[in-house]
Image (cartoon, grey):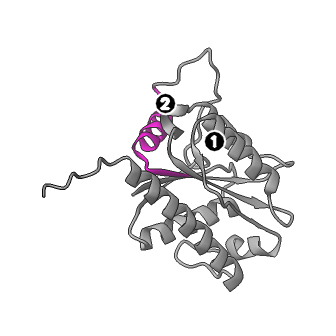
Amino acid sequence: MKIVMIAGSNRKSATSTQLTEYLVRIAEQKGHSAVLFDLYRTPLPFYSPDESHDSHEGLAQLKRLLREADAIVLSSPEYHGSMSGVLKNAIDHLGQEHFGGKPVLSVSSAGGAVGVSSLQQLQAVIRNLHGINSPEWLSIGGSQRKWFESASQDAYEVGQEIDDRIHRVLGSFLALAQLVRGQGKPAVADAG
């Protein structure tokens, strides 16, 4: 499957981005094609319905990736009980053609215990774009963030409890994506 993971932080070393990079590695280890689109590295123009940004290379790349995706992961830090502005801006550039009928996993990193408000908002937005919300979501907070703050590109020192949860949630999401993807294929008639 093709999975696009959008890291929605405007901070260079965001724990939400580090977590998303870890999810990319796990998905690839499970045999899927996973692409990270990092909004810090590829900033998008401010959305305005009065302006066309068709010539913006990063936005064109994001739209192409999402059209081709079988499943999507949206990752955000939680700021003041909400998703990040850069992630909301990116989503505002997109529409049902990018999310409709596709499973979407919501992921957050919060300074407190967990980022539930941002996850609820992400799921509401996905419903409005006719995406399929994964029944589970993933949030890290507090001391769990420290495991990703010290992460290098090659290794993460993740505690067993959070690592088990990450694998369980991602596994559930991938199973949903496989199920949805399988429904789009025509049934083969029995020739006998």
Q: Is residue 76 left or right of residue 61?
A: right
Residue 75 location (% of width, % of height): 64, 54
Residue lying at the far bottom of the rendered structure = 160
Query: Which secondary structure lies at badge 2?
Result: loop
Report the residue at 43% width, 73% height from top.
Answer: 29
Name the one closer to the observer, 128 or 190.
190
Q: Residue 55 vs residue 144: left or right?
A: left
In the image, taking residue 155 as reference, residue 110 lies left or right, namely right
Q: Which label is found at residue 126?
A: 1
Residue at x-position 66% and y-position 61%: 136
Q: Which mark is residue 31?
A: none
Q: Please state the extent of the stretch shown in magenta in the rendering.
A: 55-72
Residue type pointed to by label 1 = Ile
What residue is shown at x 86% (from left), y 64% (from top)? Answer: 112
> What amino acid is at disc 2?
His
Q: Nearer the viewer, mark 2 or mark 1?
A: 1
Q: Residue furthest front?
A: 192
Q: Position of residue 32 (x, y in %)?
A: 40, 64
Residue 182 in magenta stretch = no
Residue 65 lies in the magenta-colored region = yes
Residue 164 position, x and y percent, is 64, 79
- Locate the N terminus by quadrant: bottom left
Where does residue 41 sit, x and y in percent of width and height? 56, 49
Residue designated by label 2: 56
Q: Is the residue marked by circle 1 packed among few (<14), some (14-19), or many (20+) residues within 10 Å?
A: many
Furthest residue toward top: 50
Q: For mark 1, give the secondary structure.
A: helix
Asked whether the viewer can see residue 50, the reply is yes
Q: CA distance from mark 2 to mark 1?
A: 24 Å
